[in-house]
Amino acid sequence: MQSYPSKLLENAINEFSKLPGIGKKTALRLVLHLLKQEKEDVTNFGNAIMQLRNEIKFCKSCHNISDTETCDICANPQRDHTQICVVENIRDVMAIECTRQFKGVYHVLGGIISPMDGIGPKDLNIDSLEKKVAEGNARELILALSTTLEGDATNYYIFKRICKYSIEITTIARGVSIGDELEYTDEITLGRSILNRVHFEPLLAR
Amino acid sequence: MQSYPSKLLENAINEFSKLPGIGKKTALRLVLHLLKQEKEDVTNFGNAIMQLRNEIKFCKSCHNISDTETCDICANPQRDHTQICVVENIRDVMAIECTRQFKGVYHVLGGIISPMDGIGPKDLNIDSLEKKVAEGNARELILALSTTLEGDATNYYIFKRICKYSIEITTIARGVSIGDELEYTDEITLGRSILNRVHFEPLLAR
């Protein structure tokens, strides 16, 4: 058991090493780095973390994180509010936003159905999704979950709950990634990408 | 350029990504982890960091970090105050303390002479070391710096300043690490370890 020359140091190291992927050695390195910084900078660091946790809000419409009651995307009249893209978490929102290919709004489930981890439909934002769809303003629901067993189970569960409403339910295309070589692609992906082939469009023309 | 759904989130990510070895993606992962924790835990985390920076002291004798004016090692009458081990930084103090083989006191230089990084003797705690030696209570000065060009240069600089006092100057043994295979050891280390051979002592007997 490592002993530290200072309680304050030990405290800070323990706090850092609670973060995922950070062990005691890395924590020590980070803490010693902070010790070399200006007091003001370290205060800013601490405050940024506490402010984030205490003041962050979740959009009451899509459950994305936001500084306001309604997030920038839901509040934007330029976005197509009839298209709802269902994603697992806010990182997926950021990833899709980065592509600049989607002009609709999102719905963040906050997880995925996973009985192994004890996460059932009740733990996810599915009731609010059904309510939103029941209001009848939405035209298309795009399921953009991971292609895993859990993702497919969640897709199916949502489909069963939503299919009674008159809304088109789509899912993002599965296929060979750009840059991938065919011979290393798994059979299911390759099979689907042949079945769901689309009209040729040169990438450069986009 | 990635855009974030919240200023608070962006702030916290920017602060985290200033830490060494942490990029924007890792910062996002850490910040989202903190968001899931209890408010109280996050407040503790922030406070531990700020307290560390604002309240930590450096031992006025050996420059090790400490919660008090004089560190636990220097304040301990059981330690041999006539043996001073010169190290680069507080991590080296912790590493040597872990071995439980040294009962003397330390002197933390706070760095190593490195003209490439603009660090000269004036930036290190060498004046206070000379003053301590000049007081005449010390019997042995153990140089325990890294075996690099900079470490050797620093060793030599300290030797030149201290050799006028009647104090024994030693350096930690260089040799083949335990567990290393001879054929992969570099020539200089192997050469030195033959020249500086010691009487055989079985490891198990220790």
Image (cartoon, coloured by chain):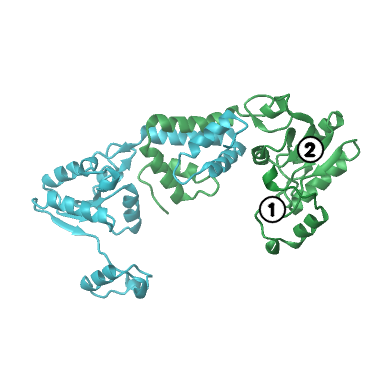
Chain colours: A green, B cyan
- Identify the element where label 2 is drawn: loop
Tell me: B160 left or right of B76: left
At a point 87% along the width and 36% down the height, the residue shown is A167
Residue A178: percent from left, percent from top: 67, 52
Residue B88: percent from left, percent from top: 28, 49
At a point 42% along the width and 46% down the height, the residue shown is A28
Residue B45: percent from left, percent from top: 50, 37
Q: Quadrant of the N terminus of chain A?
A: bottom left
Vertical position of residue B100 compared to residue B183: above or below: above
Pick whichever of labels 1 and 2 is earlier in the sequence.
2
User: Do pointers 1 and 2 mark residues of a single chain?
Assistant: yes
Q: Quadrant of the C terminus of chain A?
A: top right
Q: Label 2 is placed on what type of residue?
A: Ile
Q: Give the class, few, some or many, for how many residues have Cα within 10 Å of label 1's Cα (few <14, many ≥20).
A: few
Q: Which residue is mark 1?
A: A177
Chain of the residue under the numbered disc 2 shown in the image:
A
Q: Quadrant of residue B37?
A: top right
Q: Give the class, few, some or many, for how many residues have Cα within 10 Å of label 2's Cα (few <14, many ≥20).
A: many
Q: Are marks 1 and 2 in contact (CB under 8 Å)?
A: no
Q: Label 1 is placed on what type of residue?
A: Ser
Does residue B40 appear in this view?
yes
Q: Which residue is mark 2?
A: A126
Judge by depth and name the residue closer to the eye, A98 or A160.
A98
Judge by depth and name the residue closer to the eye, B45 or A86.
A86
The label shown at residue B102 is none
Tell me: A58 left or right of B84: right
Q: Quadrant of residue B142?
A: bottom left
Residue A63: percent from left, percent from top: 71, 33
Instruction: Give the spatial CA distance, label 1 vs label 2.
Output: 30 Å
